[in-house]
Amino acid sequence: LEIQRIWMERRKTVLFVTHNISEAAFVSDQILVMTPRPGRVARIVRVPCPRPREIRLMKTPEFASLVFEIREILGVA
């Protein structure tokens, strides 16, 4: 939520690197899903959720579907 607050105040591009799929889906407008070594972009996934986002978004079927889509791309579904 803090990252979202800062972004909404400043409206600057942020490159956020994480291994946490739910975190990426919550804070991002688009997610670059990377391959293992050598790291390349496997797919760009757009996050259709409007801003500002509330934590309860993570309990919705749409959010679960987005997280599952990313897990499938990574082969960990």
Image (cartoon, helix red, strand yellow):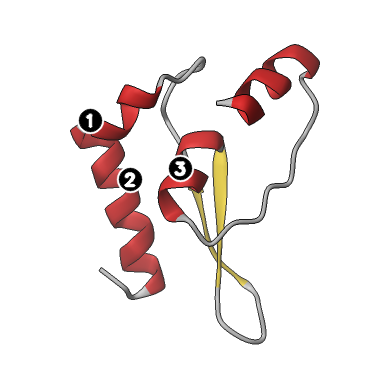
Q: Mark 2–mark 1 contact, CB under 8 Å?
A: no
Q: What residue is at 63 percent from the left and 86 percent from the top?
A: 37
Nearer to the camera, 21 or 70: 21
Task: State the residue position of label 1.
Answer: 60
Locate residue 44 relative to residue 38 in the image: left or right. Answer: left
Which three-letter amino acid code belongs to the residue tagged 1? Answer: Thr
> Is the residue marked by circle 1 packed among few (<14), some (14-19), or many (20+) residues within 10 Å?
few
Closer to viewer: mark 2 or mark 1:
1
Q: Mark 2–mark 3 contact, CB under 8 Å?
A: yes
Numbered marks: total: 3
Numbered mark located on residue 3 in the image? none
Residue 6 horizontal/vertical position (percent): 72, 22
Residue 4 horizontal/vertical position (percent): 61, 25
Q: Quadrant of the C terminus?
A: bottom left
Q: Quadrant of the N terminus?
A: top right
Q: Give the residue at the far bottom of this rendering.
A: 37
Locate residue 61 relative to residue 29 in the image: left or right. Answer: left
Q: Give the residue at the far left of this rendering.
A: 61
At numbered mark 2, what does the secondary structure look like: helix, strand or loop? helix
Task: State the residue position of label 3.
Answer: 25
Which three-letter amino acid code belongs to the residue tagged 2? Answer: Leu
Instruction: Please tell me which of labels 1 and 3 falls first in the chain.
Output: 3
Where 51 falls versus 28 (above or below)? Answer: above
Task: State the residue position of label 2.
Answer: 66
Which three-letter amino acid code belongs to the residue tagged 3? Answer: Ala
Where 25 falls versus 72 (above or below)? Answer: above
Q: Quadrant of residue 55?
A: top left
Instruction: Please tell me which of labels 2 and 1 falls first in the chain.
Output: 1
Residue 63 horizontal/vertical position (percent): 30, 37
Give the spatial CA distance, label 2 vs label 1. Answer: 10 Å
> Is the residue marked by circle 2 packed among few (<14), some (14-19), or many (20+) residues within 10 Å?
many
